[in-house]
Amino acid sequence: FLTVCAALILTAGMWSAEPETRKIALTFDDGPHPVYTEEMLKVLEQEQVPATFFLLGENAEQYGEQVRMIAEQGHLIGNHTWRHVQVTSLPKEEAEEEILAVSSLVEKLTGNGTSYVRPPFGIWDPELEEELDMIPVLWTIDTLDWTTQNVDWIVEKTVQDAGENDIILMHDSYESTVQAAERIIRRLKAEGFEFVTVDQVIMD
């Protein structure tokens, strides 16, 4: 009888326990965009989800208001170089300037510079990390959203590949990405994922 009771209590505990949440980070490259960054921010605000935006300097300079909006809504701003260049193809001084110029502009617009950098094409020079005291951030899931406007395909690829501490790469430059991101967020939330900024993934 005691054994049966213990089994019932254990089973009840198993059923009542809340499932563990799994962290996952949503990131956006190449912005800000004059239209779709704002649309993305509306989705993120509606879903109460933080994200990380790796900005291009040339776009941030042109669309400073969107940069401020990203910061004001509490998202993390990262650095994606000024002109989307492969940093290893440049002299070190020029590569440093590509990154430092973005950080300086973001600080001017928001009050804070950038501590995280996503090198275009995922190609990084470790010596720059030491020189600039910045942390490179790559990705684990590439949605390839820039290659297609097929929202269903983007959503299914991302949800199927998603796992704990993954970093999802998207681009806030397309209407299809805004639509896909909203569906991805809802699907992954339903599966027990918690969205965080990349620093909470890589520093954990």
Image (cartoon, helix red, strand yellow):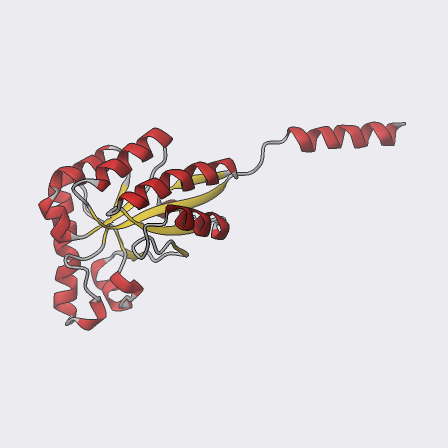
Residue furthest right as drawn = 1
Can residue 202 be seen? no
Give the image location of residue 168, x and y in percent. 38, 50
Residue 127 at x, y = what percent? Answer: 25, 68
Residue for point 31% across, 45% down: 176
Tell me: 25 left or right of 93: right
Q: Quadrant of the N terminus?
A: top right
| Residue beneath the point at 39% across and 50% down | 154
Residue 147 seen: yes
Image quadrant of residue 13?
A: top right
Q: Residue at x 12, y 52 (%)?
A: 58
Closer-to-camera residue (139/1) = 139
Above or below residue 19? Residue 122 is below
Q: Position of residue 203 (x, y in %)?
A: 39, 49
How far across and how far down the image is residue 66, in percent? 17, 39
Q: Is residue 95 above or below residue 22?
A: below
* Residue at 17% in and 37% down: 68
Q: Seen in the image, is 10 located left or right of residue 44? A: right
Q: Is residue 120 above or below residue 173?
A: below
Relative to residue 109, is residue 88 depicted above or below?
Answer: below
Q: Nearer the viewer, residue 203 or 60?
A: 60
Q: How many marks?
A: 0
Question: Relative to the observer, which residue lies in front, 199 or 88?
Answer: 88
